[in-house]
Amino acid sequence: MGKGQGVAVFCDVDGVLTDVPVNMQLATLFRIEKQLELIEDKFYKDGDTDAFNRAFIPLFRSAGFTETTAKDVFDQVELRNRAVDLLDVQGADLYLVSSGPSYYLDILANTHHLDIDTRCKYSRYSFGIDGTLSSVRYVAVGEAAKKTFVRSNVDRYALTVGIGNSVQLDGAFLALCTIPILVGSLAKGFLCVKELDPVIDMISALKI
């Protein structure tokens, strides 16, 4: 148990709230999924978030992805079954902890009334005056940044739940939580689930 009071949930996005990563869904809409697959494969092998951004930003720019289209296609990004229930879960403070993009996650956070400054840690992107993604103004969030963010908040709560989908990319922040959960993966030391139903049921039942 932690030093504080109540329950907090630190939740990854890609692979947890979505089956298919946000950027991959957007790439499919813009018909650049094959090119992004190569960039994603390299990222999952080396975990180099900066290298990922140096490759993916020009790709999205060339496909015509803009600040306007990011808003237009928001509703076309598919969430995992019961993801909305987790986003709106009662009895716990929800945090979003992700390498995913602010041009989608800012809208998601605002839709579900999550304070972006205090409850969210994810990669932040900017758009230039032409409306396209800036290749120089971004802040990538990787494994270390997620761990630091969670560490700065866990002691505020008596019990914390961490939800991710990858030991490699999420294990560091999950290890800081009272109950570390992996969605769609198997690993020793984690509560492993295929879908969100048991996670939501457990969180809803917690009484601290």
Image (cartoon, grey):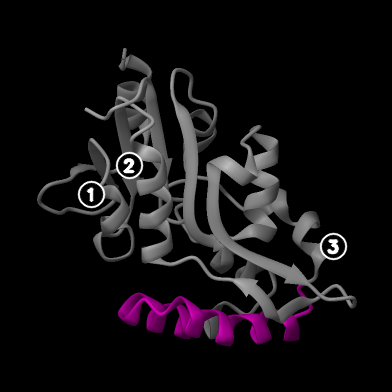
Tag 1–tag 2 contact (CB < 8 Å): yes
- Which quadrant is home to the C terminus? top left
Residue closest to the eye, 132 or 8: 8
For badge 3, the amino acid type reads Thr
Percent position (x, y) of residue 80? 48, 44
- Mark 2 or mark 3, which has the lower sequence index? 3
- Residue 50 among those drawn in magenta: yes
Label 2 sits on what residue type?
Gly
Cα gap from disc 1 to disc 2, whole angstroms = 8 Å
Q: Point out the stretch of residues depicted in magenta.
A: 37-65
Query: Disc 3 designates what residue?
Result: 68
Question: Disc 2 marks which residue?
Answer: 162
Which one is earlier in the sequence, the residue at label 1 or at label 2?
2
The residue at 48%/34% (across/down) is: 94
Rendering coords of residue 124 (x, y %): 63, 64
Disc 3 crowd, CA 10 A, few/some/many (<14, 14-19, 20+): few
